[in-house]
Amino acid sequence: GLLSLLAFSALCGIGALPWQPSSAAGSAKGSDPVWTAAQQLDETQKDQCHGYPYLRMRKVLHNNLGNRGPDPGAEGLVLEAMGKIKGQSRRMLVIMNASADYKTAKPEENGYLGRVATVNIKSGSKVTLTISFRDAATGKPLVIENLPLTFFDLDTAVGNACQESVSVPIDGPAGLRNDNYYLSRETQVTSTLTLGERTFQATMHGTMADNPTDIIAMTALQQKRTITLVYPKPEYVKVTLAASHGAGSRFFFFAVKPSLLCALTVPVGEKYPLGDLDYFPPLDTPIFSRPGETFQDWFVEDGEIVEKDHAICTVIKKDGHGYVYRAPRAGTVNIHEKLETGVLIDMAFG
């Protein structure tokens, strides 16, 4: 089994509810509320994502999207993920297949980055992805109710070149059905419906400096470039990723989580405390820290296979004495956050 290792504590601090249900125009009037670091996250806000499925990408098993490599063999990109669906944890496969017109200069960079899946295309091109889900143990297809997909960082290059867009069908087995999508207030993404297809298009220039680093804690600007789609009960999902003419590649990032429904607004230049550890019992076993401990060092690498009682990390306790956390069972180490020496764990996790 997998072994998830990292201390975590209750999340509190900056709170925001920067989303609205889609209307006929796809957005609501009004401006973002002002939130301060002193404001506590209330129960209503904390529960906005509760009950929705959530998948965390963990491993690239096969990378040959559109037969562009780098792996030989069958066409497609296959990711292993841990999923939590209706309170049940399970290992899953996320399978992406590309249309024949797929063009990329960096196929080796397809896969996942942290909590998000990532696919890149050449500017001036488009690709239609068919995304499906299977049980990792049996290989059987999975139909996931209320499936959320959130796309982040929809922007353009200088002069409105390389304009990114995401298009999805409304009807059919892969359709969004009730046209159920979410945008932030004062969104920078346009939404249009043409011939049964909903298209979300970037309108503003962006750089790597304003890319989100978390799927929940985002600046107001990052939220304005994010969309969340919710599918009632899809057999599979089809999305068309496109970028207008320009230089270089464009990267698309998405997560299987309704991020805009529970987003936390982070002021520019400030770092939000680390979130609660994603773990999926009984497949994962977390290690909990105690109040007042200071992190010192890891004794293992992410992905390392360990036996029970193997030394995992060391901390300084509140009384000043050192303490070594050990593996509660044999498994594979899954480090979600790279804590640094000298960090007070309570502060790091809010």
Image (tube, rainbow, N blue to C red):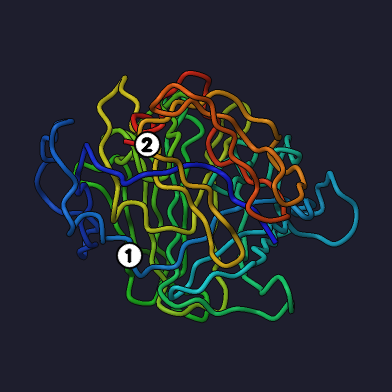
Q: Quadrant of the C terminus?
A: top left
Q: Which residue is mark 1?
A: 50
Q: Are marks 1 and 2 in contact (CB under 8 Å)?
A: no
**Residue 313 at x, y = what percent?**
61, 33
Q: Residue furthest right?
A: 72
> Callout 1, which amino acid?
His
Name the residue at 38% across, 27% down: 318
Q: In the figure, is residue 243 to the left or right of 317?
A: right
Closer to the camera, 89 or 75?
89
CA gap, disc 1 to disc 2? 20 Å
* Label 1 vs label 2, nearer the camera: 2
Q: Which residue appears at 47% of the width and 18% of the height?
A: 342
Q: Is residue 341 left or right of residue 267?
A: right
Which amino acid type corresponds to the residue marked 2 in the rendered image?
Phe
* Residue 141 in the figure: left or right of residue 273: right
Image location (x, y in percent) of residue 175: 46, 74
Give residue 159's position: percent from left, percent from top. Answer: 42, 23
> Crowdedness of circle 2 by 10 Å Cα count: few (<14), some, many (20+)?
some
Label disc, if present, on residue 230 of the rendered structure: none
Upstream in the sequence, badge 1 or badge 2? 1
User: Is residue 333 positioned above or below 143 on the image?
Assistant: above
Instruction: Report the side of 243 relative to 73 (left or right).
Output: left
Tell me how many marks there are: 2
**Badge 2 is on which residue?**
349
Decide: few, some or many residues near mark 1? Use Cα within 10 Å; few <14, some 14-19, many ≥20.
Answer: some
Disc 2 element: loop
Q: For residue 44, which quarter of the picture?
A: bottom left
Task: Say above or below: 220 vs 183.
Answer: above
* Residue beneath the point at 68% across and 31% down: 299
**Towards the viewer: 346 or 227:** 346
